Image (spheres, rainbow, N blue to C red):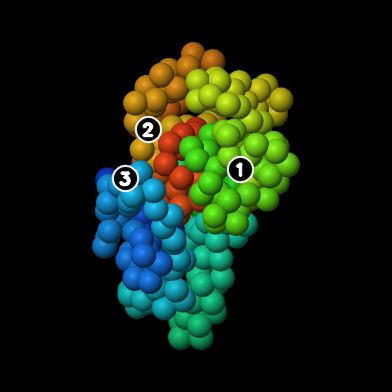
């Protein structure tokens, strides 16, 4: 059985500690504050500087997906070692990262015809993508084959969810991502939409006019999800993520744990530039994905 390496584009927001702990190789997105010079997220520009630009300067930064060459440069050394590759990408409804990764795969398959190179459309982003990657890494450590890991990813992406509240709707408007959300209200910039990411697409979960009501509604939406689907919360891991409103995290997480006591929460994380460029600062939400042991193979 050939060894393999797990990759992901940087939209997963796994963070440096988990990236190292779970041996995940990242291909980062690019961030631009002036819309001219682009820097690799975290590697060349910190999230602190990025969020400071948004909050202090009221700026609207831009992001750019990893290039085909970025994926080739990341994949080739691993293939030269005789390893196979499995790589998750952000849902294509939010970025075309999968196109870069797939083109790189096709080019490298000519050079390495015997290698397995799997590109997985995760249907997810940020925390739920991270949770899937962590489970994939656990499977690898447990001796599972790359094909078993692929089978897990294809199942898990269907069940994974993100429920979050947008901090500033103007960023969705500027980024052209407002879509379905525009139908919610005539005074659109005064509301806080609740968004559900499922099946790779953004869905409206409701709208509120205060953060407190929004967070309470997110708890209700999450509890109702498990009730409606019949899924057992103990089969899932969850993460609370925020762009920069850390003060809201403890209470929100406590309310989620109270409402869904069997759902296991891992330590919270910071949402990265790819998501925040569209949602703005002040974004907060919960992500969850199914444990690999809960599936039948």
Q: Which of marks 1 and 2 is in front?
A: 2
**Residue visible at 37% across and 22% down?**
250
The image shows residue 59 at horizontal and vertical percentages of: 39, 53
Quarter of the image where one finds residue 43:
bottom left
Numbered badge on residue 49: none
The image shows residue 135 at horizontal and vertical percentages of: 45, 44
Q: What is the quadrant of the C terminus in the image? A: top right
What's the CA distance linking mark 2 and mark 3?
14 Å
Sequence-wise, the earlier of marks 1 and 2 is: 1
Sequence-wise, the earlier of marks 1 and 3 is: 3
* Secondary structure beneath label 2: loop
Q: Kindly tell me whether residue 47 is visible in this rendering.
A: no
For label 1, the residue is: 197
For label 2, the residue is: 245
What's the CA distance linking mark 1 and mark 3?
29 Å
**Residue visible at 46% across and 45% down?**
280
Q: Kindly tell me whether residue 280 is visible in this rendering.
A: yes
Sequence-wise, the earlier of marks 2 and 3 is: 3
The image shows residue 29 at horizontal and vertical percentages of: 41, 62
Q: Nearer the viewer, mark 2 or mark 3?
A: 3
In the image, residue 191 above or below residue 256: below
The image shows residue 286 at horizontal and vertical percentages of: 50, 33
Tell whether 27 sits left or right of 155.
left
Residue lying at the far top in this picture: please name it.
Answer: 258
Sort mark 1 into few (<14), some (14-19) or many (20+) by Cα contacts within 10 Å: many
**Residue visible at 41% across and 57% down?**
61
What's the CA distance linking mark 1 and mark 2?
21 Å
In the image, residue 175 above or below residue 21: below
Q: What is the quadrant of the N terminus in the image? A: bottom left
* Secondary structure beneath label 3: helix
Tell whether 25 sits left or right of 202.
left
For label 3, the residue is: 56
């Amino acid at each position: 059985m050939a060894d393999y390496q797990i990759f992901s584009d940087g939209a997963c927001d796994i963070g440096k500690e988990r990236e190292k702990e779970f041996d995940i190789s990242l291909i980062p997105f690019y961030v631009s504050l002036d819309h001219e010079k682009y820097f690799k997220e975290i590697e060349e520009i910190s999230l602190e500087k990025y969020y400071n630009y948004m909050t202090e300067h009221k700026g609207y930064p831009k992001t750019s997906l990893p290039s085909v060459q970025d994926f080739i440069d990341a994949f080739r050394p691993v293939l030269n070692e005789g390893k196979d590759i499995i790589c998750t990408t952000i849902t294509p409804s939010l970025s075309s990262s999968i196109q870069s990764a797939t083109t790189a795969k096709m080019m490298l398959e000519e050079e390495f015809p015997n290698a397995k190179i799997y590109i997985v459309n995760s249907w997810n982003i940020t925390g739920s993508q991270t949770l899937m990657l962590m489970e994939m890494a656990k499977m690898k450590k447990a001796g599972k084959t790359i094909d078993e890991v692929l089978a897990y990813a294809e199942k898990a992406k269907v069940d994974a969810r993100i429920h979050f509240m947008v901090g500033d709707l103007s960023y969705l408007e500027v980024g052209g991502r407002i879509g379905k959300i525009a139908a919610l209200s005539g005074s659109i910039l005064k509301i806080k939409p609740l968004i559900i990411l499922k099946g790779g697409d953004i869905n409206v979960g409701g709208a509120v006019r205060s953060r407190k009501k929004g967070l309470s509604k997110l708890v209700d939406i999450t509890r109702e999800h498990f009730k409606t689907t019949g899924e057992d919360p103990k089969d899932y891991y969850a993460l609370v993520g925020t762009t920069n409103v850390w003060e809201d995290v403890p209470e929100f997480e406590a309310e989620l744990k109270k409402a869904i006591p069997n759902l296991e929460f891992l330590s919270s994380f910071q949402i990265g530039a790819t998501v925040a460029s569209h949602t703005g600062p002040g974004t907060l939400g919960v992500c969850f994905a199914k444990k690999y042991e809960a599936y039948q193979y």
